[in-house]
Amino acid sequence: MAKEKRIKEMSDNRVTEDNTSHLEGWFVKRRSRSATQRMSALVLMALALLSTSITSGVVTAHPAAAQSAGVEITWTLEPGELVVAPNTSVTWVNSDGARHRIESTSGPERFDSGNLDPGESFSFTFVLEGTYQYIDGRNPDLSNYWGTIIVQSGDEPPSPPIADVFMANRIFSPPSVTIQVGDTVTFLNDDGRDHTVTARDGSYDSGLMPSGDSYTRTYTVPGTYEYFCAIHPDMVGTILVEGDGGEPPPPPPPPAPPPAPASGDVSVVDFAYEPASLSVTAGTTVVWANNGAALHTVTARTGNFDSGLMSAGDTFARTFENPGTYEYFCTLHPGMVGTVAVTDGSGDAPPPLPPADPPPPPSPVAGDLTIVDFAYAPRDIEVAPGTTLTWANNGVALHTVTARSGLFDSGLMASGTTFSYTFTEAGTYQYFCTLHPDMTGTVIVPSASGDVPPPVDPPPAPAPAVSGDVQAVDFAFSPVNLTVPAGSTITWVNTGVALHTATARNGSFDSGFLNTGDSYSKRFDAPGTFEYFCTLHPDMVGTVIVTADDGSAPPPPITPPESSAPGAAGDIAMLDFVFDPVTLTVPLGASVTWVNQGAALHTATAEDGSFDSGFLATGESFTMRFDREGSFPYLCTLHPGMTGTIIVDPTAPPPNPQTGGGGIENPGSDPTGSNLVSASTGTSGGPAAADVAFIVLFGLVSLGFARNVIGAMIARRET
């Protein structure tokens, strides 16, 4: 078996059979590209590659030559790995017929091209030495669009990483590898977060693998070996070990009966503590036992105890000598939370935790322009041609920097992130925030004579990739009302620049986020009147009227059903588009629960950044404990007109007992660095809710809230 050939194919190309349909689509689209696009792409690539030489599949830019290099985006990245000297400008040219987005996942600096239409290009100057991993944000799961830029001094490129299985973008690639008995498999963590390689049957475990680490395993017995990542259990893979004669491997053995659960007062399962709350008397020793498959921790919020990483079957014990209320969580899965209430034996309620110190205000991010909630400062700026401007989001809410002409787009920017763009030509460039369209700004680039050019005209709108019955433009549906017979399928296409959704008032359908060019289809089988709106821009409304076969008038709009899901009760209801009540007064140490009872997505985000629910869909909830006296104003970052205030008064009576609840308390200061992770959950306080919370947390824990939860929602493959 030519194992070396297999390894080289994977390390050079990293293209799997799953990409076949995408490649077929590319060839179709490529034939339709215009001659102008092809010529512009070739010219740009020729300029970018003047200073490069190609050796062994790795492109090296000679430091002595002009500091520039190029990558062509076709059905893959050409080249996929590039070695350059510091201060080299790399240009990506989209020679494909589809839209792409170059987005870094690791490295000393961050870069993001925004959407690149066919024929467009993006340049970034690499100043700091290091290894930069990047993906196509619109096709994040396609390994042929995973690239590497290595910035180093000197001419000799390093050897490319060799591995049989790569870990990147929260998947094992390829997910299945076939080898002969006696072969050794190398697993390489090519991701920006920690992972493990853990056998389902417990026969091997790599332990925690930081980015760049590798792990090898020799398979001496034919068989089918299933494995997973103990931190991210949705990451799974299989090793198929053939016999000496090439006979197929035997199937995996039937799952062994579950082991007897480890004994403990609290069972740690995937992904909850059972019970979540425990009451004991002073002097009691509490034992936690990990009966799940994933790694977990038991970590006090105050930092006075920590189990460290607990593998399946491990236990951790802690003796509680002093009365008090001790909150803890899992540092790997912050949605897992629990409480130990320690009494003095008299039956009196334990004292609450001491008030936490207020979080220090975050250091502002440097930039030429500051993004605050909800404005650009300065709003207008004049610069010379060739100037690179940097926008820094120093607000709490998500924002974008999006040209009216479509020339540049930052994508969604979380608090503390930056976006840069170089203005090479004279012009007047108007831009706005796609989430908050009233936020506008202008960049003026005078000509050499000092004249101020008129605003840059947007390019002719390309024909939508999918013809639609309804167009979502900025900021309306066209047509607003549409009448169709029963059995019709309606397609919405976003032909605007901003993100949009098509969401039914009664909750019967929801498109999710639609990026420019994306489409959504819904079949209407029953007569009726269906009202819908955009959850990001609530003034965008529309109606689909579905008539019966006999031509009779359709029934009126369907009234949204009363929420009957567990957990619909809460201290504060999130409606469309108000918090109810707007102001809530609670005693010190009280926990407040927000429940989204509207159809739109909402957030509960403190103006001082001390808490943030993340996005809450209909029926989801978020709970925050208030251990400091004072007034805490908050808002919905998607709908900034939605505001509220929590007043913490030690003399206030306790809130009414909740009949549902089920929210998960906010992790607060998360030692994993994922402070923007949503502590939201579904509608139940039991294991099912924990599962939902963990799924929500999958894309958020390591790379921060904005880049992973929203990126996953909007970066979808071209259809």
Image: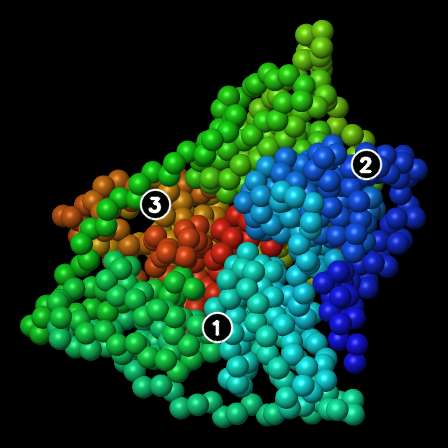
Residue, disc 1: 207
Q: CA distance from mark 2 to mark 1?
A: 45 Å
- Give whichever of discs 1 and 3 has the lower sequence position: 1
Q: Residue at x 47, y 39 (%)?
A: 416
Indicate the quadrant containing the C terminus: top left, top right, bottom left or bottom right.
bottom right
Q: Quadrant of residue 323?
A: bottom left
Q: How many marks?
A: 3
Q: Position of residue 285 (x, y in %)?
A: 20, 78
Q: Residue at x 41, y 57 (%)?
A: 672
Q: Which residue is mark 3?
A: 610
* Residue type for callout 3: Ser
- Left/right of residue 572 with respect to residue 522 in the rendered view: left
- Position of the N terminus by quadrant: bottom right
Amino acid type, label 2: Leu
Specify whether 548 is left or right of 695.
right
Residue flagged by tag 1: what amino acid is it?
Answer: Gly
Lateral position of residue 370 relative to residue 3, left or right = left
The quadrant holding residue 442 is top right
Q: Position of residue 471 (x, y in %)?
A: 73, 42
